[in-house]
Image (tube, rainbow, N blue to C red):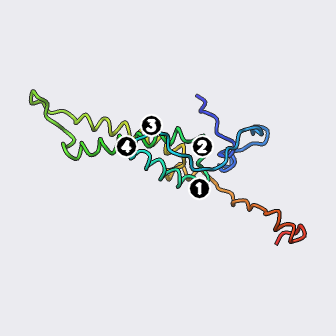
Amino acid sequence: MVGKPLPTHLKLVKGTARPGRLNKKEPKPPVTIPEPPSHLDDRAKAKFTELAKTLARYGVMTELDAGALARYAVVWCRWVDAEAEIKKRGPVVKTTSDNIIQNPFLAVANKCLLQMAQIEGEFGLTPSSRSRIRMEAPSETVDPFEEYLNGGKET
């Protein structure tokens, strides 16, 4: 089974890029901190903004990533809520007929953990996903005026 293709920039930082297989016309959206989508509640918006700032600082947040990050923020809130219910009621609960069953919120929390782990891997938010990335030194932007003052020579 073949996995989904990696974006060119990830192939480059992972060191798996082959010149003949690179998509030279792949979109390269600029790094930015997008506004959180309006459908998120205040807590999810706060998580979205917190992570967007962190991801932008490391050069991996663009406006195209807002949807994936919004999904993460929603699932993160759901996980926090489920964990609060587990803490309050315990991992097992008694039914109305006195049967003891697993707390349904435990299943919700576990599903959220799986979904969060998948999205975290996409953004490089886990140690193992970061271990596969090789960052190049950031390129310095040349100020045209500075270049003119230096007579076209680098300082």
Question: In the image, which is nearer the foreground, mark 3 or mark 2?
Answer: 3
Tell me the amino acid under the disc marked 4.
Answer: Cys
Q: For the residues labelled 4 and 1, say whether their Cβ atoms are less than 8 Å apart.
A: no
Question: In the image, which is nearer the foreground, mark 3 or mark 1?
Answer: 3
Question: In the image, which is nearer the foreground, mark 2 or mark 1?
Answer: 2
Question: In the image, which is nearer the foreground, mark 4 or mark 3?
Answer: 3
* Residue sitting at x 40%, y 46%: 42
* Residue sitting at x 61%, y 50%: 32
Tell me the amino acid under the disc marked 1.
Answer: Tyr
Tell me the amino acid under the disc marked 2.
Answer: Glu
Residue 39: numbered disc: 3
Residue 33's place in the image compared with 23, above or below, is: below
What residue did someone put label 1 on? 58
Q: In which quarter of the image is residue 29?
A: top right
Going from the N terminus, do you reach mark 2 or mark 1 first? 1
Going from the N terminus, do you reach mark 3 or mark 2 first? 3
Left or right side of 45 for 80: left
Cα–Cα gap, marks 3 and 1: 26 Å
* Residue sitting at x 68%, y 57%: 136
